[in-house]
Amino acid sequence: MEAMNTFNSALKMLKMDPVEVALAYPNRSACFLHLNMPEVCLFDIELAKKLKHPAHLMHKLDARASKYTALLIDEQFEDSRFTPMTPKLSFDEHKEFAGVVNCLKIRKNDEFGRHIVITRDLQVGQTFLIEKPFAIIPMRFHGAPARVRCSHCFEACINLISCKNCKGVSYCNEECMAMSFHKYECNMPISLSRKETFELLMRMFFNVNAAFTDIDMLMKTVDTLLKGGKLDNLTTEAQRNFCSLFQLTHNHRKMLEHQMDRFRAATDVAIITINRFPDLKSRFRTLKHQRFLQHLLLHLFHIAEHAVELYEYTQEKDSDSMSKMECERYAYAMYPFSCYINHSCLPNVWMYSVDDRLIGKVIRPIKKGEQLFRSYAVALYATEGLEQKRLAMDLQFHFKCKCFICTNKQWSSQIERMSLANDPLYKVGIKPYEMNTQAFRKQSRKTIEEQLKKATEFLEKHDHLHPVYDTMVMQGNLFGMWSTLTSRY
């Protein structure tokens, strides 16, 4: 994996020098062989052949290609490979929202604003959401992620090709590069792209601009939304997704004056950035259109606080258990439906990501008519510095959590008083937590399915006692299994 990251970094530095890149691709292909991905090795070899690979080394490419092709039809090799599970919705898909089950509804009240409720009972382990983002950006300024990813689909560690004009991004292939908005972002001055919120704003704007070819139609749509009217003229999924995001609650009235000044200044920078491109500038020629653009960008800035952070989970080779998995942020995204799920320190659903998709799983039994809650924090049950965490939540999201943990000051002293470890369901379901990911994935699928079943049955059985230590550990164990089974690495 470290070699893979180094090769990908080197390819960015080469800026597509044909000869040097033609040497780098075959060397990178060896990494894929160690990752049991011979079909991807072959792709790198084909990339090298298309470039100016030295003729006297071409026989090595042919020999390596023959070796990898033979592996693809080797049954013994195939049996040794881990095939990740593909997440699937537990119920039929929603008619309005892609990747969402049809038993979820958006509701609105004074206490929670817009939020999500269910129209049927849900059980632990069911998948209610597999959503693609409206806009997504990489995490650039919080340390390098464990795996290099495509800048469009965010698939990890594949045959990345770099932009020919800058070193900032890499893509799976020419298709991903063409589908992105990198033509606007290429070589953008550092001063304009240092802030992730600013970069996310620009991605949202590029998507909105592409979704509405008629600016007057966009203005009319926004006006209808602000007045609470109903829209019947939306023809594309991108237009509907924009409308969902536009209606997210924002808290500009709770912001301090210096925070608002920062937003206004960033909006001015965004307008300057947009005006650098003639095709964008020409769409906002009149004073009326320019004023609309300014207000639209400011609004997008406000709702960007609802963005979801995506994490990848890694484990050191010498680690003895999945309980020691570490998470690192790799992306920051806006999801039209998921962004409506409110926060609780005691959530009933957990979210994890596969590439750019956000996967929603039920972690506690949920009754018909109840609201879905996820945690906005990774350390779900951290009791140290609880007051500091509440203060940070208030500053970032402008609300005070009223969940059981935050309103029950005796909770932290009570959670270890009850032990459920002698339950036979616990003994089977917790086993993955005590082994590393490699050992876990080497088990038969039948064994893994039994462990998943016992873990979910345990949480269903003891939900009336939650949160106690053993139910929280089992939730972490189940989350580790889900994320490990759907990851390629």
Image: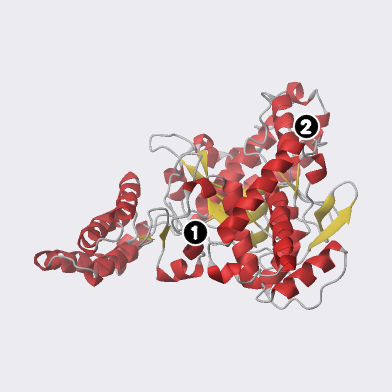
- Mark positioned earlier in the residue sequence (1 or 2): 1
Residue at 22% over, 70% down: 49
Q: Where residue 472 appears, x then y in whole percent?
A: 67, 36
> As drawn, which residue projects farthest toward the front?
287
Label 1–label 2 contact, CB within 8 A: no
Q: Where residue 284 appears, x then y in whole percent?
A: 66, 68
Residue at 65% over, 32% down: 421
Residue highlighted by disc 2: 405
Q: Residues within 10 Å of mark 1 (few under 14, many from 20)?
A: some
Residue 123 visible to an observer of this rendering:
no
Q: Is residue 158 shown above or below 146? A: below
Q: Where residue 2 appears, x then y in whole percent?
A: 34, 44
Q: Is residue 202 left or right of residue 228?
A: left
Helix, strand or loop at label 1? It is helix
Helix, strand or loop at label 2? It is helix
Foreground residue, 165 or 464? Answer: 165
> As drawn, which residue projects farthest toward the right?
110
What label sits on residue 185 in the rendered view? 1
The answer to which quarter of the image holds residue 287 is bottom right
Residue type highlighted by circle 2: Ile
Mark 1–mark 2 distance (CA, rounded to whole Å): 43 Å
Residue 197 visible to an observer of this rendering:
yes
Q: Is residue 159 left or right of residue 330?
A: left
> As drawn, which residue projects farthest toward the top?
413
Residue type highlighted by circle 1: Glu
Q: Is residue 139 left or right of residue 385?
A: left
Query: How was the colour assigned to the protein in this rendering?
Result: secondary structure
User: How many marks are shown on the rendered structure?
Assistant: 2
Q: Residues within 10 Å of mark 2 (few under 14, many from 20)?
A: some
Foreground residue, 372 or 423? Answer: 372
Residue at 33% over, 66% down: 39
